[in-house]
Image (cartoon, rainbow, N blue to C red):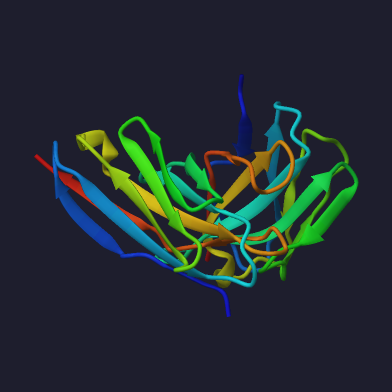
Amino acid sequence: NAGVTQTPKFRILKIGQSMTLQCAQDMNHNYMYWYRQDPGMGLKLIYYSVGAGITDKGEVPNGYNVSRSTTEDFPLRLELAAPSQTSVYFCASSIQELNTEAFFGQGTRLTVV
Amino acid sequence: GQNIDQPTEMTATEGAIVQINCTYQTSGFNGLFWYQQHAGEAPTFLSYNVLDGLEEKGRFSSFLSRSKGYSYLLLKELQMKDSASYLCAALDSNYQLIWGAGTKLIIKP
């Protein structure tokens, strides 16, 4: 059982470049989330989805976009990368509402130079 | 505003007991989570409390006082593998998780 799989694990981007962080889960979870984690800070919610075809903004959505065409996949798109987007990104999923355990992917460490 | 406070770092000795505190201020409250995160790894779920009181799960216990906006995670019989960051997160009235910055726990032999 793979759980939540994120790719890539590491990436260096130049300012202005774009990229997509991939996230897939095989637990048939309806809820999926993207977080960023900066040193000394709590996890910040970027976007979330409550099911295929439905996405919504979290606390820090600017500079990012998401799509949810299937239950399994929830990619995060960075357009015009900026140094402020240097962070560790985590994808997570849960079976239903947020008052249940969330399962996290292994993270993507992104550096924008 | 919404806020979660927990100590930045704590040190304890192998075999001992440690209590990690967390205070929260949120608009509404729908429960509190504790997650463990080893360095360079993903957070993993430890506990969820929504009612006042202590919930025990093996060596780990979690306590909640809703009236005081306070929770703690109690770790007993500490092992070296318990060296990690412990994240406290509160669920607000909109079912949004508000995360603390985490407490880095260092275990010494």
Judge whether residue A111 can be spotted in this image. Answer: no
- At which x and y percent is residue B91? 61, 58
Query: Furthest-bottom residue in view?
Result: B1
* Residue farthest toward the left in the current orientation of the protein: B109
Residue B55 or residue A26, whichever sits in front: B55
Instruction: Give me the residue at 35% from left, 30% from top.
Output: B58
Residue drawn 61% across the image and 63% down it: B29
- Locate residue A77: give its quadrant: bottom right
* Placement of the C terminus of chain B among the 4 image quadrants: top left
Q: Nearer the viewer, residue A11 or B87?
A: B87
Q: Left or right? Give the position of A69 relative to B50.
A: right
Q: Quadrant of residue A4?
A: top right
The residue under the point 24% across, 38% down is B76
Relative to A13, is B83 on the left or the right?
left
State the residue at coordinates (68%, 49%). A33
* Placement of the N terminus of chain B among the 4 image quadrants: bottom right
Above/below status of B20 relative to B25: above
The total of numbered circles placed on residues is 0
In the depicted view, which residue is nearer to us: B52 or B16? B52
The residue nearer to you, when weighing B44 against A113, is B44
**Is residue A32 among the parts visible in the rendering?**
yes
In the rendered image, the residue lying farthest to the top is A1
Residue A15 on image: x %, y %? 62, 68
Q: Quadrant of residue A73?
A: top right
Residue A101: % across, % down: 59, 40
Where residue B15 appears, x then y in whole percent?
A: 14, 36
Q: Is residue B80 above or below residue A11?
A: above
